[in-house]
Amino acid sequence: MSTYIFKVPDLGEGTVTSEIVAWHVRVGDTVAEDAPLVEMATEKAVVEVTAPVSGRIVALHGELGDSVAVGSPLVVFETASAAGSSAGQESYSTSVTAIAAAVPVAETGVAVSSGRVRASPATRRRAREAGVNLTSVVGTGPGGRIEAHDLGAAAAAPGTKSSSQSSGPASNPAAGTQEIKVVGVRRVIANRLSESARTIPHFAYVEEVDVTLLEAVRQRLNASASSGAAPLTYLPFIVAALTRALAQYPQCNAQYDTERNVIVRHSAVHVGIATQTPDGLKVPVIRHAEQLDVRALAAQIARVADSARRGTCTRTELTGSTITVTSLGKLGGIASTPIINLPEVAIIGINKALDRPMVVNGAVVIRRMMNLSSSFDHRFVDGYDGAALIQAVKALLEQPEQLLPLDD
């Protein structure tokens, strides 16, 4: 037998530390080469790191939520193969799989001594929060898949806590409270939003939009849509209007490079679609939205939102947005103050549409109204320009035929 020390790999993009998001193994497990070992988060992505050799795990370095330096010991194997022929051998390379930028691992099998683990990203997250090691849980779903209800009994059973939690100091929360360690996606969200709120002087601008005609157009197009077409909500129309308006106000379709102290304006509009998922907020990106009509935008919005919720977006699909649109749908409220998605300089929030009495030409009539709540980086976007952008979007949404191809 020989000892093989596997060190924290360089996960790319100049990272010097990575955060331990989830261990898939415990001390004493026997694993095969390329079996998943651990999920590690950088500022850009959560990455699944696999075993460089086959062998028995004799030590794990680091607990859930720890930030560990590249090149420091991570896992110690006891091996019988040539790969571990020299005691204390160091390894800096391994097979890594990018799960997605700032999102958790999608469903995967884990080849460890206790068998193959199958579970959804949401179930894995709940298990991490409860301190349950999934390798000790019997799944009742198809093919042994671990379902959410399987975690209830496992959490109360002895011997199911993860090694990363059981090896640390005991936690003694007060009665009636629950302690949840902030790791992985939630930590990335917390850090990015804190940085944005701390460094950007936000100014908010809210405007109401009469979407009565837009509602009629939307219903007409949905009624004539081909089978299987993505339904037209307000969102693709708003994105279409935004891409047209940004041509007049390029200072709002920009990113601030803090290291070079340069504003980078983009002719292409890469729209981030803020999406709520079981694992937190993600922002998949629709690239070159200015080249798509409303039907194509609807299809792309549905595709990227579904991928984000399923945890299957690629790193490319979750980076590179030049402006973000966020909506709470039916929970949209009257107004909101969205936080800018760094390094962008503007974000547009959509509030819910309601039928309201309005005065039109001296008469009180019922119109469908919706508010747009926007935030801008006041360092680079003047109040006039931010307001003018929203007024241009408003004008297009109130005359929606301008947003449609001629054949519609």
Image: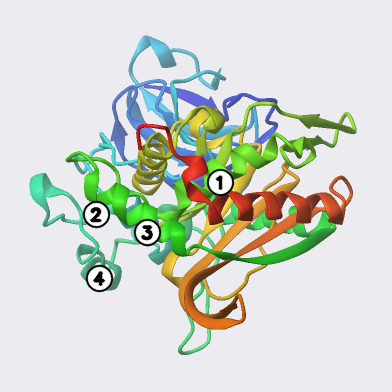
Q: Residue furthest bottom?
A: 175
Q: Amino acid at mark 4?
A: Gly
Q: Is residue 229 above or below residue 152?
A: above
Sequence-earlier tag: 3 or 2 = 2
Residue that badge 2 annotates: 136
Sequence-earlier tag: 4 or 1 = 1
Is residue 18 visible to us here? no
Q: Nearer the viewer, mark 4 or mark 3?
A: 3
Q: CA distance from mark 4 to mark 3?
A: 48 Å
Residue that badge 4 annotates: 152
Q: Amino acid at mark 2?
A: Ser
Q: Nearer the viewer, mark 4 or mark 1?
A: 4
Position in image of residue 88 (x %, y %): 54, 22
Sequence-earlier tag: 4 or 3 = 4
Position of residue 343 in the picture relative to residue 156 (left or right) = right
Count every numbered label the image shows and give the total: 4
- Image quadrant holding the C terminus, namely top left
Residue that badge 3 annotates: 216
Which quadrant holds residue 17?
top right
Position in image of residue 116 (x %, y %): 20, 40
- Image quadrant holding the N terminus, namely top left
Residue that badge 1 annotates: 62
Q: Residues within 10 Å of mark 4 (few under 14, many from 20)?
A: few
Sequence-earlier tag: 1 or 2 = 1
